[in-house]
Image: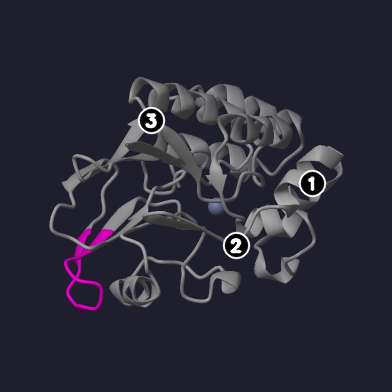
Amino acid sequence: MRIGILGDIHSNVEALRAVVDALRHDDADIFVQVGDIVGYGPDPSPCVDIVRDLGCITCMGNHDAAVLGLLDLSYFNDKARAAVEWTRPRLRPSDVEFLRALPLIEQRAGFTVVHGSLHMPDQFGYVISRVEAQHALDEQTTRLCFIGHSHSPCVYLRRTPNTREIDAYADSEIDVSYRGFQRVLLNVGSVGQPRDEDPRAAYGLVDTDEERVWIKRVAYDVPAVQQKILAAGLPHLLASRLALGI
Ligand code: ZN
């Protein structure tokens, strides 16, 4: 089976369409979405529609929680808060209903989906350091776990569930076999707002038969999204950063 994993879409429908096209080309059998469908970008409702229509196995991100009023906005910086406040009145009732139904953690046979970390998932902590990866892996009971939140792709591998040894790969594109590893923690990067200095949309692909994991990148029409962000009256920085991948 091939699992296509996408997340941190952040209301960027141009990037999302490019990733969905790429995942169809990659013969993904099922789709997973790791949270933050909305926030930052100009097209929340079209992104919700695509995630719903793909039948994604999904979880809730901190921006999804914030637009629903489930998270204190003092947690957010000025630009993120402005985008949350811009997004709220523009959501359709059906969008609110869809976002509200998202779980913090979704577990299926063989894999778990969470936005930040399995370690205190409601706190939306990041997995960036090895220590944070250890804490997350300690809570992982399935072989695979898919996360987002940092907007930077990375994969952490343990040969046995409780070993302290971790193999880690962080790069804009990754192609790694996980044969012989019982725990795989994959941060798939961001569709709609990459922060690893590569402006191309990021997504993950896992082949469970080959036991192989990829992070792939796909270019999309960044200037079109930047124009929409400015026309919407969203903060300029949210447009300019897209061209730099920061
Ligand atoms: Zn995010």
Q: Nearer the viewer, residue 155 or 26?
A: 26
Residue behind mark 3: 28
Residue under pointer 1: 96
Position of residue 184 in the picture relative to residue 3 (left or right): left
**Residue 54 placement (x, y as % from top left):** 56, 31
How many dots with numbers?
A: 3
Q: Which residue is mark 2?
A: 104
Q: Residue at x 62, y 44 (%)?
A: 37
- Tag 2: amino acid: Leu
Q: Is residue 6 left or right of residue 38?
A: left
The span from disc 3 to disc 2 (Cα, nearest Å) is 24 Å
Please tell me in which quadrant of the rendered image residue 62 appears: bottom right
Helix, strand or loop for disc 1: helix
Q: Is residue 37 in the magenta section?
A: no
Residue type at mark 1?
Answer: Val
Which dot, 1 or 3, sits closer to the camera?
3
Pick whichever of labels 1 and 3 is earlier in the sequence. Answer: 3
- Quadrant location, the N terminus: top left
In-front residue for pair 243/71: 71
* Dot 1 alpha-carbon crowd within 10 angstroms: few under 14, some 14 to 19, many 20 or more: some
Q: Which residue range is magenta in the image?
A: 156-168
* SS of the residue under disc 3: loop
Q: CA distance from mark 1 to mark 3?
A: 28 Å
Can see residue 42?
A: no
Confirm or reject: label 2 Cβ below 8 Å from ligand 1: no
Disc with the residue nearer the chain's start (1 vs 2): 1
Viewer-closest of 110 and 203: 110
Query: Is residue 177 positioned above or below 70 on the image?
Result: above
The front one of 216 and 157 is 157
